Amino acid sequence: AAGVKIARDSPFLARAASATAAETMLSVGDADGLFGWEPADADGQAAHSGGTVERLEAAGIPGASLRVLWTSDLLRYGPHAVRSDLDPETKRRLTVFLTNLKSQTPDVYDLLERAHTGGFVPATSKDYAMAMGIVRQALDGR
């Protein structure tokens, strides 16, 4: 909120070996904040299940004492990919199968994907615009 620039070598940043280590640093008072994540639903809205806030609450930090200061646009999980030499008709059928799976056979979808409940959608470059922006900004700050 104060407009403080954040760079890799900022003296007020501490590196953590993992998300769990960063969460531990916050819970024992060795850090005042952290960069975390929260799952989103198919529409990009916070799912409020899983993620950093839920783990911090499970570690004993009252949810009322936590504040989210910033959120990015949606960052999608990595896409599923197929070999470029796969028969075009097979690719088409696979795409139709995966993108219709959740709506047509939700019980089969739940067997394949328990954690990410949004379903499969065709990926576009727009889905990764936020991630590309973060990478560009990180590279510019070298």
Image (cartoon, grey):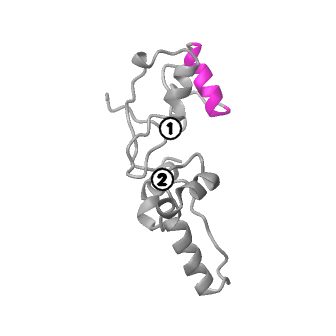
- Give the x, y percent position of residue 90: 62, 82
Query: In percent of the image, x 51 and y 61: which residue is there?
Result: 120
Please give the name of the residue rendered at 54% of the width and 23% of the height, measured from the top-left corner. Answer: 56
Instruction: Name the dominant secondary structure of the magenta segment.
Output: helix
Name the residue rendered at 59%, 74% in the picture.
94
Question: Where residue 30 sits in the image (x, y, percent)?
Answer: 58, 16
* Residue 8 or residue 87, whichever sits in front: 87
Is residue 19 within the magenta segment? Answer: yes
Residue 129 seen: yes
Few, some or many residues within 10 Å of mark 2 (<14, 14–19, 20+): few
Quadrant of the rendered image containing residue 4: top left
Span shown in magenta: 17-28
Q: Amino acid at mark 2?
A: Gly
| Picture residue at 37% right of the left edge, 30% below the top | 69
Where is residue 40? Give x, y as percent: 44, 44
Quadrant of the image containing the N terminus: top left
Residue 6, above or below 2: below
Q: Which mark is residue 118?
A: 2
Question: Which secondary structure lies at badge 1?
Answer: loop
Amino acid at the residue labelled 1: Trp
Query: Viewer-proximal residue, 106 or 53?
Result: 106
Give whichever of discs 2 and 1 has the lower sequence position.
1
Which structural element holds mark 2? loop
Given residues 70 and 90, the one toward you in this image is 90
Q: Position of residue 41 (x, y in %)?
A: 43, 47
Between 63 and 98, which is closer to the camera in this rendering?
98
Marks 2/1: CA distance?
Answer: 17 Å
Mark 1 highlights which residue? 37
Q: Give yes or no for residue 35 being in the magenta stretch.
A: no
Does residue 30 appear in the picture of this structure?
A: no
Would you identify the image quadrant in which residue 108 lies? bottom right
